[in-house]
Amino acid sequence: MRHIIWGIAGLLSAFTLNAQQAKTEWNNPSTGSVGKAIPRTEFISYNIREEAEKEILSTSPFYRNLTDKLESPPTPKDSPRKIYITLVSIPFPWLDRELFLHVEGVPAFYLYVNDKMVGYAQGSHAPAEFNLSSFVTDGVNTIRLEAIADGTGAQMESGISSEDDTPRTSFRNVYLYSQPKLRIEDFELFPGLDSTGRNGMFSVKLAVANSYNSQETITVGYDIYAPTGKLLYYDMRDVKLPGKGRDTVRFDEYVYGVIPHLWSTADPDLYRVMLFVRRDGRLIEYIPYTLGFGETELHEGKLYRNGQPIDLSVARYNAADNRPQTRDELITLRQQAINTLLPDYPQPEWFYDLCDSIGLYVIDQADINPLPTSEGSTSTGIAPSNDPAWLPSFLDRLRAMQARNKNRTCIIGWSLGTTAENGYNMYKCYQWLKKADPRRAVIFSNAQGEWNSDLELGEIHSAEAILKAVELQRKTAQSSSRR
């Protein structure tokens, strides 16, 4: 395919120039995104239960990783623009499903499918997803991504230094996935306790959708399994969906026997949930998820887990390049009495899996990190955090973070950013998060005593320093043992 791409490099260059002249979203802080699907929990659905239980993406016929298939015509190394392109053959059965593209990795980008603009998004670390169903055809389709390392997206992330000065124009995680036209679009799971604190209370809220023109009746449901593998409860319900319509189905059930296996950092016991959709007696979609029972609550500036106060030992930490190394580092931090992680920005999805299973709290931090005044001031001389014109960009990043990780057991709070100053946009971000997720704490380290922060974190340790010290001790011990 490489020779195809190089042959159209000139065409792409001309197209990019025209696009830059015609499109202004990349440099307009009042535009957070265009054409992006509503942010949601990150998941892949399966059509066979056994495959869903294994939860191996490569086994799903409706998932296709494109990260390593993106080819790029040569451009100057320091160019703030870079084109990526891939040719994708869409199998005919996928045309009767809803097809989505998942993208992570650059400050801002445009998406084109078969030379038609699908949309624009910004944010290096939270995913952006686009519905491609109306843009693709049977056979070979062209997907083109134009990465942009300057403009609003870059300015929103300028306060967090990168490893070098090279513009960030490389995508990290790009894949296609599809779902049935009758499907679960998103879900909220709350595995808490009843008012007595003696039994589990499991709340399930399923956002279901119908992409057909006619009214359809489907059955949606779930089952939940204890850490021992025992089936604890299941339920299902019929729902009528109008053509091109949506609805929300809610379950609230007592689940007995969960008290011995509540999730905590000392005992991170996890339950397995399977969501499903049935149509005309045939199961057409399975969605697996893992979670812990219990509640984290905020009372008078203090956090409680399952009714007991918790003391936070916080370290600033960002995931390593791969899951195995990150797992080893997280275990080391846990052994060094760290129980809470504060990343600089949203992390890869597998990072939260590891924190759930190892037993670490996470305060998930939005990638809202413009340079402080005066370097980060806008053309009006006002800092982005206090310029209402920037609010759409702030909220877009906030919503992407919260929607993706709202069901994560390890997350005990949300942070509004590291380098941003306080101001109008940070007030609005705080209010939005408190309404979207009233159970969790919202933290802003630069609130300067104002009302838009629920919690003072105290000392924040450097995970990097801790890991280096542990490694030095290990090497010293090995050297001593050889003598």
Image (cartoon, grey):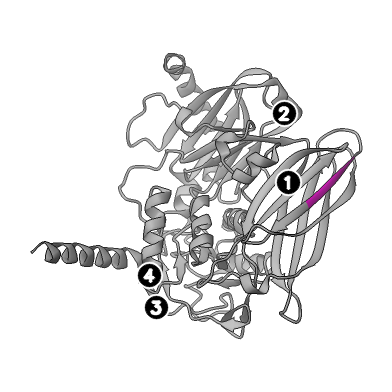
Question: First in sequence: mark 1 or mark 3?
Answer: 1
The numbered disc on residue 459 is: 3
Q: Write down the residue under mark 2.
A: 134
Bounds of the magenta segment: 217-221
Q: Which mark is residue 335?
A: 4
Q: Where 50 sits versus 296, above or below?
A: above
Measuring from the top left, give residue 335's x and y in whole percent.
38, 70
Front residue of 66/60: it is 60
Q: Are the residues at dot 1 and dot 4 in contact (C-beta closer than 8 Å)?
A: no
Q: Which residue is under mark 1?
A: 185
Q: Which of the two residues, 41 or 39, is positioned nearer the viewer here?
A: 41
Q: Amino acid at mark 4?
A: Gln
Sequence-earlier tag: 4 or 2 = 2
Q: Quadrant of the C terminus?
A: bottom left
Q: Is residue 218 magenta?
A: yes
Q: Is residue 45 visible?
A: no
- Between the C-alphas of marks 4 and 2, the distance is 51 Å
- Whole-angstrom CA distance, mark 1 to mark 4, is 39 Å
Disc nearer the start of the sequence (2/1): 2
Nearer to us of marks 1 and 4 is: 4
| Real-space CA distance between mark 1 and mark 3, rounded to the nearest whole angstrom | 40 Å
Q: In the figure, is residue 84 to the left or right of 127? A: left
Indicate left or right for 16 with 246 as reference. left
Q: Is disc 1 placed on a helix, strand or loop?
A: strand
